[in-house]
Amino acid sequence: MAALTRFLQDGRLPLSNNAAERDMRPVAMGRRNFFYVGSIRSGEAIAMLLSLLRSAILCGHNPRDYLKDILTRMPSAKVADIPDLLPHRWTPA
């Protein structure tokens, strides 16, 4: 019972968990929609791509700009440059 009233003692806690549920919705929808993705390799590829895009969003980047930039820079990038293209270290060219 104490856990259900904890928000009354700590004003920083939200009254509902709608934000957490809203953040989890794309994961659940993707799990259902990508069930028929075609093959295990294509499922792994789409999972990596969506994870990369979601990480970019969480880092505050526009996903379209991020993806366009890294896809144009990757063909000429050296192996040592790849970590700089990850969302938490990326800076637009």
Image (spheres, rainbow, N blue to C red):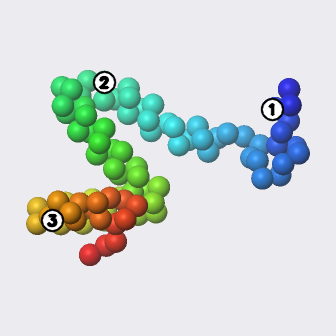
Q: Which residue is mark 1?
A: 3
Looking at this view, name the residue that lies furthest to the right: 9
| Quadrant in which the C terminus appears | bottom left
On the image, numbered disc 2 is attached to which residue? 35
Tag 3 secondary structure: loop
Rendering quarter of residue 49: top left
- N-terminal of the two: label 2 or label 3? 2
Identified at 44% across, 38% down, the residue is 26
As rendered, which of 15 and 6 lies closer to the eye? 6
Counting from the top left corner in percent of width and height, residue 83 is at: 29, 60
- Relative to 10, say whether 88 is above or below: below
Q: Is residue 24 left or right of residue 43?
A: right
- Which residue lies most toward the bottom here? 93
As drawn, is 82 to the left or to the right of 10? left
Residue 64 in sight from this viewpoint: no
Q: Kindly identify which residue carries mark 3.
A: 77
Label 1: few (<14), some or many (≥20) within 10 Å? Answer: few
> Contact (CB < 8 A) between labels 1 and 3?
no
Q: Residues within 10 Å of mark 2 (few under 14, many from 20)?
A: few
Q: Nearer the viewer, mark 1 or mark 2?
A: 1
- Image quadrant in which you'd find residue 72: bottom left
- Rounded to the nearest angstrom, the CA distance separating label 1 from label 2 is 36 Å
* Number of marks: 3
The three-letter amino acid code for the residue at tag 2 is: Phe
Q: Residue furthest left?
A: 76
Residue 90 visible, this angle: yes
Q: Mark 1 touching mark 2, by CB under 8 A? A: no
Q: Position of residue 15 (x, y in %)?
A: 77, 43
Residue 33: percent from the left, percent from the top? 34, 29
Quarter of the image for the N terminus: give it. Answer: top right
Of residues 80 and 16, the one nearer the viewer is: 80
* Mark seen at residue 70: none
